[in-house]
Amino acid sequence: MISIDRDNPTRDDVHRLLSEHLADMYATSPAESVHALDHSALSVPAITFWTAREEGALLGCGALKLLDPTPGAAGMGEIKSMRTTAAARGRGVATLMLRHILDDARSRNLERVYLETGTEEYFAPARRLYARHGFTECAPFADYVLDPNSVFMELRL
């Protein structure tokens, strides 16, 4: 059974997965278009980080960054660091993680969840996953700017 729980991005197996994720991002996108976070950046208070595991084995990870953590403000979040291990691909881990993140966003009464992903063919499966779950393309959000290598998406909750 796959479980999704809060976890520490500096944990050894997670750190390796995040390093692999960053390496792939730099291999497929120009450096100025890479917006993936490393393990230390994922450890800040505004980010909640989860892993998916089965019998202790890491299958994937994902995070939710609060974009406006001001009390009383309209809540918005950003999905960060969605990644599935090579061995777990095709098992629905990304869908489980995405649903978990969206459920958490709803429980926090966020109004919108955003994400940024790449335009390259490498990112096509991610774009399809998000579109299947209701995300639509939008303008850049937060501190992002228009970038031919980025696709910005949002989901109104």
Image (cartoon, helix red, strand yellow):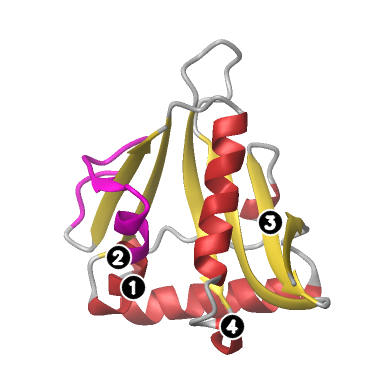
- Write down the residue under mark 3: 50
Q: Relative to the observer, which residue lies in front, 60 or 42?
A: 60
Q: Is residue 43 left or right of residue 112?
A: right
- Write down the residue under mark 2: 128
Residue depth check, mark 2 versus mark 3: number of the one nearer the observer: 2
**Main SS, magenta residues:** loop
Above or below, comparing residue 145 to residue 108 in the picture: below
Query: The N terminus lies in which quarter of the figure?
Result: bottom right
Name the residue located 52 percent from the left edge and 44 percent from the top edge: 102
Q: Is residue 124 left or right of residue 96?
A: left
Q: Residues within 10 Å of mark 2 (few under 14, many from 20)?
A: few
Name the residue located 64 percent from the left edge and 53 percent from the top edge: 42
Q: Is residue 134 left or right of residue 75?
A: left
Q: Residues within 10 Å of mark 3 (few under 14, many from 20)?
A: many
Can see residue 81? Answer: yes
Above or below, comparing residue 115 to residue 75 in the picture: below
Q: Mark 2 near mark 1, Cβ–Cβ under 8 Å?
A: yes
Question: CA separation, marks 1 and 3?
Answer: 21 Å
Residue 69 picture quarter = top right
Three-letter amino acid code of the residue under disc 1: Pro
- Write down the residue under mark 1: 125
Can see residue 37? Answer: no
Name the residue located 31 percent from the left edge and 48 percent from the top edge: 135
Q: Mark 2 near mark 4, Cβ–Cβ under 8 Å?
A: no
The earlier-in-sequence mark between 1 and 3 is: 3
SS type, badge 1: helix
Q: Which residues are magenta?
A: 128-147
Question: CA separation, marks 2 and 3?
Answer: 22 Å
- Write down the residue under mark 4: 88
SS type, badge 2: helix
Question: CA separation, marks 3 and 4?
Answer: 16 Å
Q: Mark 3 near mark 4, Cβ–Cβ under 8 Å?
A: no
